[in-house]
Amino acid sequence: MAENFHKKMPPLDAQEEAVLLHKATEPPFSGKFNDFFEEGIYICRQCGAELYPSSAKFHSGCGWPSFDECIYGNVSETPDADGMRTEIICAHCNGHLGHVFRGEGFTERNTRHCVNSLSLDFIPKKSTNNV
């Protein structure tokens, strides 16, 4: 696993703690990153590990941010407690991110990481025009 932490993260608020630590799910279409498509990198809200490049984000219409690729080694998969889904967690801090689904045909990679916005933070791509 790559050690690629950007910054010390501020403490989690009650909603972020419910999702990241207690596996809650934010309501669909409520998260700040659902319809957000700027260039940059999505990081773990709890520990700052890089999780998803913005180039992997796509609009699935499911109500949560969707990605078809993660940064290798930074997102782990584990069977969900319901026995039917696969949970995705930050490989560095074990924070709950959401679930992964395969075979839906949304993208060529045929994978959808369905992620809670509350599990994420975003670092915009640095502008080369300000050099």
Image (cartoon, rainbow, N blue to C red):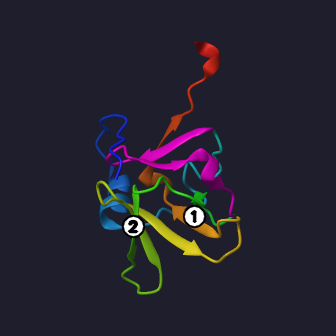
Residue located at (40% from left, 55% from top): 74
Q: In which quarter of the image is residue 7?
A: top left
Real-space Cα separation, disc 2 to disc 1, in angstroms:
12 Å
Please, what is the three-letter code of the amino acid marked with disc 1?
A: Pro
Residue at 32% x, 46% y: name it.
Answer: 47
Disc 2 crowd rating (10 Å Cα; few below 14, some 14-19, many 20+) is some
State the residue in front, 127 or 59: 127
**In the image, residue 83 above or below residue 10:** below
Q: Name the residue under label 1.
A: 28
The range drawn in magenta is 39-60
Q: Which residue lies furthest to the top in this view?
A: 131
Q: Which element carries disc 1, helix, strand or loop?
A: loop
Residue type marked 2 = Ala
Report if residue 56 lies within the magenta region: yes
Q: Disc 2 designates what residue?
A: 24
**Where residue 110 appears, x then y in whole percent?**
65, 70
The location of residue 35, given as percent across then percent down, is 65, 50
Residue nearest the observer in this picture, 105 or 83? 105
Helix, strand or loop at mark 2: loop
In the image, is residue 129 above or below residue 116? above
**Residue occupying image coordinates x 62% and y 53%:** 57
> Looking at this view, is 51 or 46 the one in front?
51
